[in-house]
Image (cartoon, helix red, strand yellow):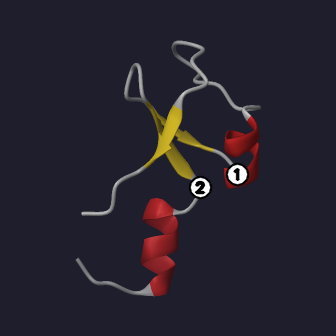
Amino acid sequence: MAKFPEAEARFFRNIFICRKCKSKIRAPTLKVMAGKVKCRKCGCKALRPIKKK
């Protein structure tokens, strides 16, 4: 996989994973930190950033 800024932003920027059901959610970082974003599937507010491999 090529490493250039556009691809990194597309894959990792503003993408979070639900800690409970492991679903992907795209949301602004400030809203997630403020607790205003919840998971669509389970309603949990515990989200973590996607891991870079």
Q: Could you give the CA–CA distance between mark 2 and mark 1, rounded to whole angstroms?
A: 5 Å
* Residue at (40% x, 87% y) in the render: 4
Instruction: Answer with the quarter of the image where residue 39 lies.
Output: top right
User: Residue 17: horizontal and vertical position, in percent?
Assistant: 45, 38
Kind of residue at disc 1: Pro
Left or right placement of residue 52 versus residue 11 in this view: left
* Residue at (48% x, 84% y) in the render: 5
Q: Are marks 2 and 1 in contact (CB under 8 Å)?
A: yes
Marking on residue 13: none
Instruction: Answer with the quarter of the image where residue 31 lies.
Output: top right
User: Residue 30: horizontal and vertical position, in percent?
Assistant: 74, 51
Left or right placement of residue 7 versus residue 40 in this view: left
Marking on residue 28: 1
Q: Split into 4 quadrants, where in the image is the N terminus? A: bottom left
Q: Secondary structure at mark 2?
A: loop
User: Residue 26: horizontal and vertical position, in percent?
Assistant: 59, 45
Q: Secondary structure at mark 1?
A: loop
Q: Split into 4 quadrants, where in the image is the C terminus? A: bottom left
Which of the two labelled residues, at mark 2 and mark 1, occupies the earlier sequence position?
2
Kind of residue at disc 2: Asn
